[in-house]
Image (cartoon, coloured by chain):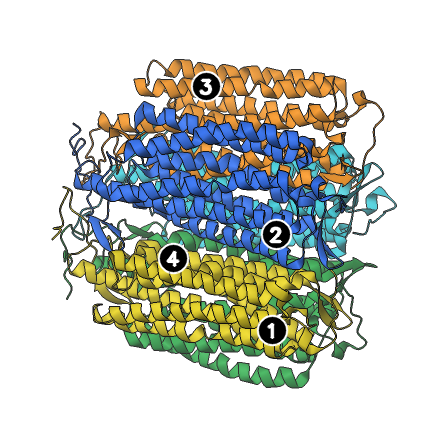
Chain colours: A yellow, B green, C cyan, D blue, E orange
Amino acid sequence: MTVLPRATPFDVAPWEIPLTPGQHVLIQFGIVVAAFALAAMALRMHAARREVGDRYRPAVHAAAAAVSVAFLSYALLFLELRSGYRFEDGMWRPGAEAAGTWAARFMDWTVSVPLLVIELIAVSALAGAAARRARAVGIAAGAGMAILGFLGAVVVGGGRSYPALLGFGLASAVCFVVLYAVIIATVLKSLPVLPAAARGPLTAAMVVLVVSWFAYPVVFGLQGLVSSGAVTTFSQVLLSATDLVAKVGFGLLVLRVARIRTAADVLAGEDVHPEGIWIDQLRQSDGVLPDGPPGALSRD
Amino acid sequence: MTVLPRATPFDVAPWEIPLTPGQHVLIQFGIVVAAFALAAMALRMHAARREVGDRYRPAVHAAAAAVSVAFLSYALLFLELRSGYRFEDGMWRPGAEAAGTWAARFMDWTVSVPLLVIELIAVSALAGAAARRARAVGIAAGAGMAILGFLGAVVVGGGRSYPALLGFGLASAVCFVVLYAVIIATVLKSLPVLPAAARGPLTAAMVVLVVSWFAYPVVFGLQGLVSSGAVTTFSQVLLSATDLVAKVGFGLLVLRVARIRTAADVLAGEDVHPEGIWIDQLRQSDGVLPDGPPGALSRD
Amino acid sequence: MTVLPRATPFDVAPWEIPLTPGQHVLIQFGIVVAAFALAAMALRMHAARREVGDRYRPAVHAAAAAVSVAFLSYALLFLELRSGYRFEDGMWRPGAEAAGTWAARFMDWTVSVPLLVIELIAVSALAGAAARRARAVGIAAGAGMAILGFLGAVVVGGGRSYPALLGFGLASAVCFVVLYAVIIATVLKSLPVLPAAARGPLTAAMVVLVVSWFAYPVVFGLQGLVSSGAVTTFSQVLLSATDLVAKVGFGLLVLRVARIRTAADVLAGEDVHPEGIWIDQLRQSDGVLPDGPPGALSRD
Amino acid sequence: MTVLPRATPFDVAPWEIPLTPGQHVLIQFGIVVAAFALAAMALRMHAARREVGDRYRPAVHAAAAAVSVAFLSYALLFLELRSGYRFEDGMWRPGAEAAGTWAARFMDWTVSVPLLVIELIAVSALAGAAARRARAVGIAAGAGMAILGFLGAVVVGGGRSYPALLGFGLASAVCFVVLYAVIIATVLKSLPVLPAAARGPLTAAMVVLVVSWFAYPVVFGLQGLVSSGAVTTFSQVLLSATDLVAKVGFGLLVLRVARIRTAADVLAGEDVHPEGIWIDQLRQSDGVLPDGPPGALSRD
Amino acid sequence: MTVLPRATPFDVAPWEIPLTPGQHVLIQFGIVVAAFALAAMALRMHAARREVGDRYRPAVHAAAAAVSVAFLSYALLFLELRSGYRFEDGMWRPGAEAAGTWAARFMDWTVSVPLLVIELIAVSALAGAAARRARAVGIAAGAGMAILGFLGAVVVGGGRSYPALLGFGLASAVCFVVLYAVIIATVLKSLPVLPAAARGPLTAAMVVLVVSWFAYPVVFGLQGLVSSGAVTTFSQVLLSATDLVAKVGFGLLVLRVARIRTAADVLAGEDVHPEGIWIDQLRQSDGVLPDGPPGALSRD
């Protein structure tokens, strides 16, 4: 581990600044707490597969994948934090691997942001070709946003180049806008069609994404403006909190929509489910098994 | 690993004191035994998902998550103990990473205490909006208690500041009181409504939480009063024992309530369950499958 | 890793003696083979949950937990063996962490011995309050035996104190006797009541425990009497073999009892099971599903 | 870790060239993102086992295995990248273990390419002996291609021998051609027989394989022609992207074929499935349970 | 890690010989490819539990355990290879831990060979006491073969003693012969009784075991005869290939027998199975559910 000393505060990347013990343990707190919450959510979503119908299950698959990938990325962040900093003369001093505490987040987003889009569309009112179209655009915009951000913030110029931050930041922002358009349009189109009980959680899910994701451009912008241990700490803790809200909170809301819609399908005779569905101990639907002979449920 | 020598016993954090081999192995014993018990409980709760009805299953999901997160945190504690202390001249001497043997516990509580509240409410008589309200308050108070405790005991002043301990300790205590109010009120409201057989274990679950959690302020207070290897060892072993009781014992009691209530729902024709429910080899209910056509179980 | 040289053979703990390459690889063989067998058994017991009725499933849960915890403890033993010994001048020489090759076993027993008691009671004829009572006594005696043994053999006097070995050994022996009484009484009370086919494996399970556990006092006693690389190796290999027999062999016998009793319950119309139960390719019972409406199986 | 300096650019293997920080982090990005996507897909395929009929489930088993193995190999690649390069004088300099960043890919392909062939055949129209024949040829050609490539690119001459690259490359190319023949013939034979809805995704799956696998000979050829940090980076990122597309994208298409065919079998009364099958929220078939007595579905 | 130089080629164990880079990477290739294939098979067998009837499921449990244990042992082999050899002066030079690359294989066989015997017997025509007898003999002979081989090849004389190799080798060979007798007798007794379709794969399973296991005495004998890097490499690669064939190939054949026999039982009204069984897309049996009331399937 080579410790990289830097002269002026405007010439360092956020991961090249020594941290006080308090700053260091706060960053670690954010990473570990987010990892724990993501692990809890991964277990929840794993079990949720049986609790929604086949129709909305792709949302649960995507949510399980998103939080599992995010958990892995937080395990990686933890590893980078431990191997990237060394305690010396009362401060935690960064080495060559400290860049990983920044880079690992972009690797996560490249995979998990598209998965969040899949989650949302899978419980929306979009079906068939419309769903496929929205999904394709959302996946491309989500992955593009993360990859372009990564190139600007970490790769080109080693995270210390204003032109790179600006250029890739603008390109990334275009993807960001497209992503917001897909999310908001999907939800707005769905609200009038969905069962009344599902509208509240779907709207909340959209708001959670749209609001919490603003943390990304804020941190991205901070990188080009100021640099100090406090800013690095603030950025890291904010990003951990954002990932927690945008993955765990969002996932629970999407799951609620999926369960309310499954219950509505059972009540409407559109689908079967082997057990009753209860939300907050209030029954939404009874268990219904398919009949023996083929074609038991009418198709039309 | 830098070994930090400290002059007077009133000027050190609990994790900055050298330990005798006996103290060190006792702390390790507490950590590993708690980890093993939590792992055993995580497996039990994973399997319990099929053993209760959909109505009470959120309790099992929360319990599975709580013990899994606690297991991860004990794995982290084990790692911190091993990388944080070095054997030299007959004593285990702490380095910069020894603070992790204290900090990792707060990271755990920030996630697991809210999960324990969710567990309890999910088997109580609270439903719908009342459940959501109690849950929101309990989650906020639980996470707040842990985060404020963390700031006072570890972050501000490096765990050696009386004002920090006092100030954050008092703020944390407010959350503590709110949390107790939520827990006790939830149980007291539920007891008259629940099936008779469920009242014993629910009361016991409440008592387990309310009594065992007193260990937290005790250890928190000790940090500001005395410091020696014996106190550090006592604190660590007490906290491991508390986590074991408050997560494993509590979880088993909540599971018992959930199974008794599921059986009561089956007997009342309120829900179905694909197999009989037995407790201590005494049958509580028979297996009942839903009928084929929708609406087989009456709703009213 | 500090290598601890000791003067006389009566003044060293078993984990403070250098080992020849042959002794070292034999100890490793015992640890790894036991770990592999426990892993195999953990998978078996995980799958067994669906293969017994709800009535006896607590036995399977306890068995799964016992072997999983034991597997974790053998992984820990492996880690301690590797980090605790260093090859130098043709011998493997112990360092400060070699004590872990002894201590980790007590950590395992503190959790797994109570789980073995739960296993046995859950397939016995004890039910309701009688089962709860026997379980409470057995758990306390089992955990007490392990904790007291740990204090005498490892903590007090660093494993080199005759008074500690003697005092804690006697206290531990009292728990040992209580444990045997619980186990034997449970089995003897059960044999007349159980289906004939279940009596053989239940008796065998008892014998396996009662005989194999004698290894524990033998090794405990050896520690105070003789010390050499051969004795350390003998003790380690014996303990690995004992754990293997008392957890894997015992667990398979308990599982057989649980399956025979489930089949007997199905034949008696006491319970349902979704598939036939076969033992050594001989059919014990057919698959039986519950009926649709509540109360399909008579209760009396 | 020994750093291997080499004289001329034509005398080094791709893993023997120092990398700039930007190149190094780009390679790591490719590896970690592919690993995350493969982990997400492994979870998806694990859950998919219940979502297709027994007839096409071998495709899901093969896909789950392929992405799980690929995930393990990317974990290994990550390990090799970290232990194989050391940061010194502003560059990441390769040591003896850097060869693993190349070798681990061939180890993956030796197992995963045959699994991809099994996947495709299991949803094709080939059945019985024809399926077994195609599978045997495809497995042999796939494993042969990877092993021969490994011998030429890594083993013989240490990756720096033109004759080895040429000789083994040609032998590997023969397997490559056979593999393409099996894949294309399988799909072309199947298209006329399959349900119309399944033809699109099956064709797309074939195209994905046939196009993306061209990356392998391209990278293999580059090794013999040019060598620089940029080429190494390009090769690594291209291979990660290829594995991602050829395993994740391909697997999702194969799963879609399997689900469409399962639904078609249910509609035709050829098979049962316990729940409805929906694709993009459009219902493909209803849930159908088998009848009680044997022979409920006609065999003819 | 101490590098052990040895004078003459007849005085070294196979793991004490320096390896060229090509030899080292070939050994690693064999280990990692076998590990990947075993991981794939462990996933396959885990899922197979639902795909065969309760009668033959012990074969699947044993197969899942055998490949999982073998996977763990290959992970251990990988670890030993990495910590046991160090690159120096153009060669990989062995240290004290290199013996583990040989010893870990015997640890695996001690557990996995008995499991393979259980697998075979569980799908054979042996039932009841005959099955228990054959199983007991097979387990004892399998474990004995591995333990005696381990003592002769690794423990006694440090793997460099002709008398040890010869003496323990002969004792191990006796077990080997008994094992072959059990396997061949079991299969020959079963062939006339089994459904015709199951005879092919059962015979093939036997042949796979009987032929591939010849690699063990070959490698064992080589150890006493010649020693060079090429021989060590040949032995390691051969053993990896053997384990792959004897565990993965054998397991797939046993699974095929178990599925064909389950289908035959369903057709004969001897057992039920909740879904149809298909092999290579050809239907073997339909799904059949048990009836509601007890005793639905006739027993006689």
Callout 2 touching callout 3 (CB < 8 Å): no
Location of residue A214 in the rendering, given as x and y in whole percent from the top left corner: 46, 75
Q: Is residue E125 left or right of residue E81?
A: left
Label 4 SS = helix
Q: Using the rendered image, report if marks 4 and 1 lie on a common chain.
A: yes
Instruction: Identify which residue is drawn at 65% across, 80% down.
Output: B156
- Residue matched to label 3: E206
Location of residue E258 in the rendering, given as x and y in whole percent from the top left corner: 36, 28
> Which chain is disc 1 placed on?
A
Q: Amino acid at mark 2?
A: Met
Establish if C247 lies above or below B178: above
Label 1, label 3: how many angstroms apart (C-alpha)?
69 Å
Label 3 SS = helix
Label 2 SS = helix
Q: Of E282 and B48, which appears nearest the observer?
A: E282
Q: Amino acid at mark 3?
A: Met
Establish if D126 lies above or below B24: above
Label 1, label 2: how many angstroms apart (C-alpha)?
56 Å
